[in-house]
Image (tube, rainbow, N blue to C red):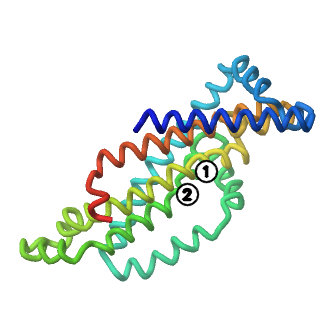
Amino acid sequence: MKFLFAAKSFVITALLILLWHCIVSFADLPAYIFPSPKAVATTFLSHYDLIWDHAQITLLEIGLGLTIGILLGIFSALLLSLSRFLSSLLLPLFIISQAIPVFAVAPLFVLWFGYGMASKIVMTVLIIYFPVTASCFDGLRQTPQAWLELAQTYRLSPLQLLLKVRLPAALPSLSSGIRIAVSVAPIGAVVGEWVGSSQGLGYLMLHANARMQVDLMFVALFTLLLIALTLYLSTDKLLKKWIPWVNQVR
């Protein structure tokens, strides 16, 4: 099964690269508009150290932002589920916070937290916080009735009911939120780097674009894509391993 998936991925990638090469060749596009696959590969090999240095910064920002955002989202969902008053009070605020465009608040975060890594981590946390909180809270509210009735026979306290019954039942929903968070986390880091930074793949893309180094910009973009795919596939595999009962619950 794994071999079949790898073979399909390889074939699809090869076909996309071939299509890319044909478009560049037949349309006779200049390299400063749309570089060929060969030019991008050559640039990657000649700038490998530069790409790796900037990729490490972006990957660290994404990793820290994901960790903080997921933990904060789970804590917020648990807090909302403990009290209907808190839920009615805070949930609208969470929804309003997502109505603000990320690009609109990015300059403020750079101003408040500086040009270093902190502002990029905050951006990443902001963009993943709501999906994690909403999915976990939704899962907590949809605990199977049979589980709740069984918990009543053991006379569990509200806190024990939350941690031992409702939270395990919410893990499938939470896993969906985490998958979404992993998918969009690179956006937060890169947007922060675009607004103000001197390191990271987002900064490298802007720097290359300003100097008309389109091949280097493509390399940075594909590196970011590779990071996002690796994070998603790794997270998906870990979640399936850690939550084996997901198919039975959903």
Image x and y of residue 104, in percent? 71, 61
Is 91 or 218 nearer to us in this picture?
218
- Left or right: residue 221 versus residue 74 is right
Image x and y of residue 216, in percent? 77, 29
The residue singled out by tag 1 in the image is: 188
| Residue 73 placement: quadrant | bottom left
Counting residues from the start of the chain, the first of labels 2 and 1 encountered is 2
What kind of residue is marked 1? Gly
Q: Is residue 187 above or below residue 46?
A: below
Rounded to the nearest angstrom, the CA distance separating label 2 from label 1 is 8 Å
**Number of marks:** 2
Image point (72%, 24%), residue name: 41
Marks 2 & 1, CB-CB < 8 Å contact: yes
Is 14 or 46 nearer to us in this picture?
14
Mark 2 element type: helix
The residue singled out by tag 2 in the image is: 126
What kind of residue is marked 2? Leu
- Left or right: residue 217 versus residue 185 is right
**Residue most toward the left?**
154
